[in-house]
Image: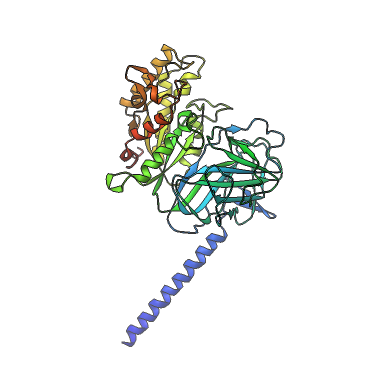
C-alpha cells in the first residue's frame, strides 16, 4: 500500500508539473501573440502576415465577413483619411464569442498608422450607434496602435465579445496621418460612416455625421465559435459582389447562401460552413485592372487561401474577360486560367466548385461572337472535369424562351446582373452537399 501511495504521489506530481508547464506555455503564447509584429515605441509595426493571436475562448476561427480590397479610393492620394474616424458597417454570416479584424494598406503608398480601433455590435440596422456593453478596443500585438506598411495588412488581437450571426458589426478606425491612397471596396451596398477627429469609442454614433458607400481599410472579420466548422469563399466579380442587390438588405447570393447553410439541418448532409464574399465588381480572371482589382489569378492566394479554415471555394469568374476584352477572348485561355485556380485550391486541400457563366443578351457588350465564347467556356465547365462540382448558374437564370438572356424576373434591368430574386435563385441552385468533401490529392 505504501508503494502504491508513493506511486500515486509521483503521478500527481507529474500531472501538476504538466499543468504548470502548459499554463506557462499558454501565457507565453498570449504574451507573444503578435508574432509578425515589431514594436516601435507604443505602436506595433505589422510584419508579413498572417498573424494569429492566442485564442480567448473556445471553438474554431472562421470568416464571419470579408471584402476583397479592390483598389485605391479616388481623391485620397494626398490626405487619405487623416484626422477622421471611419466606422465600417459589416454584416455577419455566423457568430462567435470572440472576434478579430484585418486592416489593409494594400494600395497605400506610405505606412498607415492606426492609433485607435474599436469593434462593437450595432444597436440597430443601418446605424452608427453601438449596442450597450458591446464596444471593445482593438489591439495589435499587445499594443493599442499599429503601423501597417504600404502594401501590407495587420490582424488585430482577438477580443472577447458576443458576436451574433446575421447582425451588423461596427469596426471603427482612426489614423492621425495620411498613408496616401485609401485601400477600399467601392461597391459595398452598405452605408458606413465617417466622423471628424478621433471618435472610435463614440457609442451614440452622434459624431458620425458623414456617410459613405465604401468599406475602407477593413477586409475581414473573423469569429471564434462553434457555429461553423469551416469557411467557404465566394470568389467572383460583380455578380458575386451583388452590385444590383438592394442596398443595406444583404441580398447578394453569398448572403443567401449563408442563410441557407445556417438553417440547413446537419442530418441533411449540409456542412457547417461560414460564407465570405470575395467578389470585386469588374474583376477579371486573367487581367489586372487598377479600377477593378488584381486578376483572379493574382489575388486567389490572398482572398481565398488566406481566409481562416477555408474548406471550399465557389469560383464564378470569366464574364468580364469576355465583355472587357477589346478583341475576342480566347475560351481556351479562360478555361486554362480556371484550371490554374483549381490546382491552387487542391494544393491547399480546398474543394473547388465551378459556376457556369450567366447570360447577358441585351447588355451593351453583347454580340454573337462573345456569346459563342461564353457557351464554349460553359461547356468546358460542365463537361471538362475542371472542378470537383459544378453549380449551373446559367441554367438557373436564363430565359427558357431565349437562353442567351436572363429570365425577366431574375434581371435587374441591365441584362447582366440579377435582381434580388435572381441572387436568391443562385444561392438556391447550389447543392449544399457539394461544398463538403475532400479535395483530390495533388499528384
Q: How far from the left and from the top, in percent, is residue 235?
A: 45, 34
Left or right: 437 as drawn, with respect to 308: left
303 on left or right of 354: right
Answer whether residue 344 is visible to the viewer in this image.
no
Q: Is residue 347 in sight in this rendering?
A: yes
Residue 283 lies, in percent from the top left, at: 51, 28
How many numbered circles does the render carry?
0
Tell me which residue sits at (40%, 38%) in the image.
256
Q: Residue at x 54, y 35 (%)?
A: 188
Residue 369 percent coordinates (x, y): 42, 12
Residue that lies at the very extreme toward the bottom in this rendered image: 2
In depth, the one of 212 and 59 nearer the eye is 212
Residues 337 and 273: in front is 273
Image quarter of the C terminus: top left
Quadrant in which the N terminus appears: bottom left
User: Which residue lies at the image location 60% right of the left edge and 38% below the top edge?
Assistant: 106
When the figure is inspected, residue 133 is found, relative to residue 290, above or below; the finding is: below
Asked whether 404 or 381 is in front, the reply is 404
Scheme of colours in the image: rainbow
Q: Which of 366 and 32 is in front in this view?
A: 366
- Snapshot quadrant of residue 148: top right
Residue at the left extreme, as displayed? 267
Q: Position of residue 89 (x, y in %)?
A: 55, 43
Give the answer, above or below, for where 301 lies relative to 385. Answer: below
Q: Residue shown at 53%/64% (left/top)?
A: 27
Amino acid at each position: 500500500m505504501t508503494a502504491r501511495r508513493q506511486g500515486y504521489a509521483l503521478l500527481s506530481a507529474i500531472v501538476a508539473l504538466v499543468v504548470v508547464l502548459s499554463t506557462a506555455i499558454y501565457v507565453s503564447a498570449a504574451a507573444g501573440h503578435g508574432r509578425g509584429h515589431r514594436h516601435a515605441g507604443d505602436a506595433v509595426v505589422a510584419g508579413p502576415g498572417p498573424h494569429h493571436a492566442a485564442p480567448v475562448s473556445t471553438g474554431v476561427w472562421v470568416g464571419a465577413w470579408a471584402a476583397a480590397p479592390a483598389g485605391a479610393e479616388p481623391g485620397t492620394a494626398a490626405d487619405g483619411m487623416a484626422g477622421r474616424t471611419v466606422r465600417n458597417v459589416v454584416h455577419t454570416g455566423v457568430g462567435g464569442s470572440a472576434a478579430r479584424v484585418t486592416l489593409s494598406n494594400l494600395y497605400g503608398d506610405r505606412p498607415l498608422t492606426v492609433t485607435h480601433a474599436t469593434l462593437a455590435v450595432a444597436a440597430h440596422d443601418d446605424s452608427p450607434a453601438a449596442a450597450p456593453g458591446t464596444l471593445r478596443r482593438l489591439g495589435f500585438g499587445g499594443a493599442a496602435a499599429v503601423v501597417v506598411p504600404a502594401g501590407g495588412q495587420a490582424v488585430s488581437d482577438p477580443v472577447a465579445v458576443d458576436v451574433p450571426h446575421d447582425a451588423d458589426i461596427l469596426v471603427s478606425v482612426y489614423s492621425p496621418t495620411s498613408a496616401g491612397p485609401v485601400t477600399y471596396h467601392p461597391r459595398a451596398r452598405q452605408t458606413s460612416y465617417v466622423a471628424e477627429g478621433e471618435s472610435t469609442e463614440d457609442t451614440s454614433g452622434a459624431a458620425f455625421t458623414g456617410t459613405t458607400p465604401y468599406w475602407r481599410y477593413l477586409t475581414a472579420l473573423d469569429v471564434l465559435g462553434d457555429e461553423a466548422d469551416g469557411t467557404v469563399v465566394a470568389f467572383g466579380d460583380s455578380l458575386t459582389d451583388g452590385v444590383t442587390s438592394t442596398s443595406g438588405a444583404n441580398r447578394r447570393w453569398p448572403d443567401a447562401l449563408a442563410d441557407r447553410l445556417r438553417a440547413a439541418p446537419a442530418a441533411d448532409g449540409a456542412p457547417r460552413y461560414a460564407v465570405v464574399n470575395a467578389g470585386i465588381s469588374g474583376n477579371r480572371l486573367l487581367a489586372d485592372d487598377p479600377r477593378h482589382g488584381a486578376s483572379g489569378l493574382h489575388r486567389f492566394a490572398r482572398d481565398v487561401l488566406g481566409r481562416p479554415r477555408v474548406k471550399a471555394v465557389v469560383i464564378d469568374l470569366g464574364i468580364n474577360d469576355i465583355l472587357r476584352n477589346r478583341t475576342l477572348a480566347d475560351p481556351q485561355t479562360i478555361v486554362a486560367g480556371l484550371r490554374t485556380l483549381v490546382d491552387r485550391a487542391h494544393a491547399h486541400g480546398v474543394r473547388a466548385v465551378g459556376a457556369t457563366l450567366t447570360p447577358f443578351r441585351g447588355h451593351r457588350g453583347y454580340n454573337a461572337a462573345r456569346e459563342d465564347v461564353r457557351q464554349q467556356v460553359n461547356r468546358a465547365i460542365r463537361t471538362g472535369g475542371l472542378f470537383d462540382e459544378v453549380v449551373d448558374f446559367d441554367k438557373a437564370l436564363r430565359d427558357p424562351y431565349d437562353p442567351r438572356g436572363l429570365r425577366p424576373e431574375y434581371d435587374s434591368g441591365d441584362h447582366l446582373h440579377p435582381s434580388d430574386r435572381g441572387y436568391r435563385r443562385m444561392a438556391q441552385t447550389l447543392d449544399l452537399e457539394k461544398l463538403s468533401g475532400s479535395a483530390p490529392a495533388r499528384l
